[in-house]
Amino acid sequence: MGIAYCLEYMHELKPPIAHRNLQSSFIYLTEDYAAKISDLSLWNDMCATKNGSATTQLLETSSADTKDNVYSFGIILFELITGRIPLAGNSELLADWAAEYVRWGKSLRDVVDLRLKSLQEEEIEEWSEVIRNCVQPDPEKRPTMKEITSRLKELTAMGPDGANPKASPLWWAEMAITSTDSS
C-alpha cells in the first residue's frame, strides 16, 4: 500500500512525476516495514539542475510515463504474491512471465507464495484482477494509480496512515531536511 500511495501522490503532482525504472530493487523498507521508493537518477538530475524553472523543464521532459509505472507496479504486485524474484530460475524475466500469465486469464492460485496460505480463493482472484489491469498490453486501458490505490484500499482496508512509517528515525530526518530545503 505504501508503494501505491507514493506512486499515486507522484502521479497527481503538476506536472506528474513518474519513476523512470520502477522495479522491486528500488523499493526499500523502513524499520517498521513501510515502503519507500527510490530513484537516484531523478535525484541526481534534480541536484545537477539548481534553478527552479530548469527543474520543472526536466520533470516535464522526463522519459518516464505514469502508465509505465502502473505496468511496473503490477509486476511488483506479482512478485509479492508469488514470492518470486525478478529473474525467474530459467533466466526468463519475471515481468515477461507475469505479463503472459495474467494476460491469458490464469488464476494466481497456482503460483501464490506458500507463506500467503491465509489468502482465500476470492481474495486471490481480486488481486489477480488488479494485476491483470496493471499489465494490460495497451497502456491506455491501464487504470490510473488513483484507481489502483482505491481498489487496493478496498482489498486491504489500509489507508495512507497505515502505510506511513511510524518509528523510523530516517523518516523524521528526511522530513526535517525537506521542510528546511523548502523554506
Image: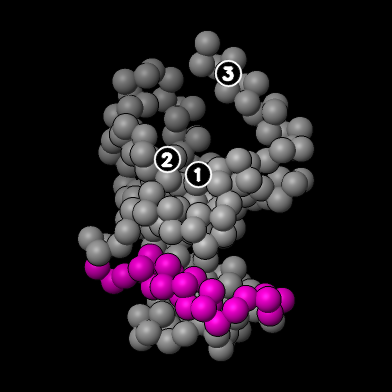
Q: Is residue 151 left or right of residue 30?
A: left
Image coords of residue 17 (percent x, y): 38, 40
Q: Amino acid at mark 3?
A: Ser
Question: How far separated are the C-alphas under marks 3 and 2?
Answer: 18 Å
Q: Mark 3 or mark 1: which comes first in sequence? A: 1
Question: How far separated are the C-alphas under marks 3 and 1?
Answer: 18 Å
Question: How far separated are the C-alphas under marks 1 and 2?
Answer: 6 Å
How many labels sit on residues? 3
* Numbered badge on residue 57: none
Q: Indicate whether residue 124 is drawn in magenta.
A: yes
* Numbered badge on residue 10: 2
Is the magenta region chiefly helix, strand or loop? helix
Image coords of residue 168 (percent x, y): 74, 37
Q: Residue at x 63, y 45 (%)?
A: 162
State the residue position of label 1: 6
Q: Indicate whether residue 59 is drawn in magenta.
A: no
Q: Residue at x 75, y 46 (%)?
A: 32
Q: Crowding near pointer 3: few (<14 within 10 Å), some, many (20+)? A: few
State the residue position of label 3: 179
Image coords of residue 10 (percent x, y): 42, 40
